[in-house]
Amino acid sequence: MAEGAIRVDGLSKVYHGSVRAVDHISFEVRPGEAFGFLGPNGAGKTTTVAILTALLAPTAGTAIVDGIDVFSHPAEIKRRIGLVFQESTADADLTGRENLELAAALFNVPRREVAARIEALLDRMQIGDAADRLAKTYSGGMRRRLELAVGIIHSPRVLFLDEPTLGLDPQGRAGFWRYVQELRRDHGMTVFVTTHYLDEADGLCDRIAIIDRGHIVATGTPSELKDRLGGDILTVRPLAPNAGIEPILRAVPGVLSVTAQEGSFRIKAPRGEELVPKLVEACAGAGIPLAGVSLKRPSLDEVFLEFTGREYREEEGGMTPTDRAVRLGQVAQAMGRGRR
């Protein structure tokens, strides 16, 4: 995998002849890297993941995963990769151990290795005490750890995690990512992750790509993306709408840019804490009362807003019809993989 664990060149997907969900995107994921793929609903994120996991065929472009052409050898890709989805894929009417035994059979794990692998995974995911209980009796966090174990029973070198912690409490989320980091450390596993929790992406991912309206609009490490904001972010909220406030804000020394946003004004500045009193003084001098001024250090939330014009929390609602159809297909694929 010298050329990358995942390599995508000019990938496009057009639905119904006119809806361009993914538009000539290109990127590479390095071996052993944790790569975050972020985007609002309808941006092309789910479609891209579905193509890379051999669920959808692209309209144009190429994708190589673990050295294999995804479109020429889809069955081989499904055998090689690991998958964990937002939707539960564990069979609730089987025990944890039986779920792992079934996955081992579907992935053709050598029979002589099955028992040892299962015991090792049950121990690592800390569900050994519940191994012989039905999965439907597991807590949300336990079920997620079981599904992670199912997804890696065949020791894949590339693991796809598609919103795997959505709905878990903070403790469950932290525990899940701890096991993922252990897998990376111990086995050099490459991880491709989508998540709606930007703190997860910030803490886990070596690099991040942001996709919006079918295009990748930014790629880099979390630190690089934050640095591209050019400084701190201040939000000025006038007490009442005032058309004259924007030029006053722009004229304050140290202000790099001003963007109107739903009744407030978003200001970029290199040293935000020094600018706050100057902004207040300028508005007071112009007779413009303020409801408040807030300061934020660069964060992935601000990065996302900068490159897409939307706050990420606004996109945490329901899936688009395309997302729903793709994810249902992913779940069906996960439950039937290896049977072909």
Image (cartoon, grey):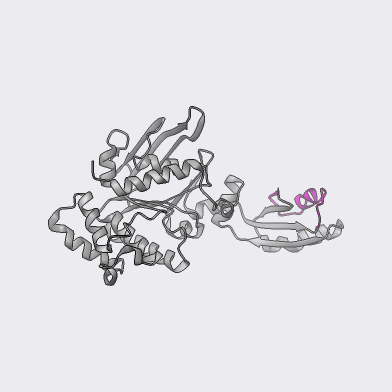
Residue in the foreground of this view, choosing between 212 and 190: 212
Residue 262 colored magenta?
Answer: no
| Residue lying farthest to the top in this orientation | 17
Residue 160 pos. (x, y %):
36, 50
Name the residue at 31% across, 57% down. Answer: 91
Q: State the quadrant of the N terminus.
A: top left
Residue 249 pos. (x, y %):
77, 52
| Residue lying farthest to the front in this orientation | 93
Q: Is residue 19 above or below residue 90?
A: above
Residue in the foreground of this view, choosing between 94 and 80: 94
Residue 258 colored magenta?
Answer: yes
Q: Quadrant of residue 171?
A: bottom left
Q: Is residue 61 above or below residue 328?
A: above
Visible residue check, residue 269: yes
Residue in the foreground of this view, choosing between 214 and 273: 214
Q: Quadrant of residue 165?
A: bottom left
* Numbered range of the magenta stretch: 240-260
Visible residue check, residue 188: no
Q: How many marks?
A: 0
For residue 175, side relative to residue 322 (left or right): left
Name the residue at 72% across, 52% down. Answer: 265
| Residue lying farthest to the left in this orientation | 112
Residue 302 pos. (x, y %):
59, 54
Residue in the foreground of this view, choosing between 77 and 252: 77
Q: Quadrant of residue 96?
A: bottom left
For residue 52, side relative to residue 198 (left or right): left
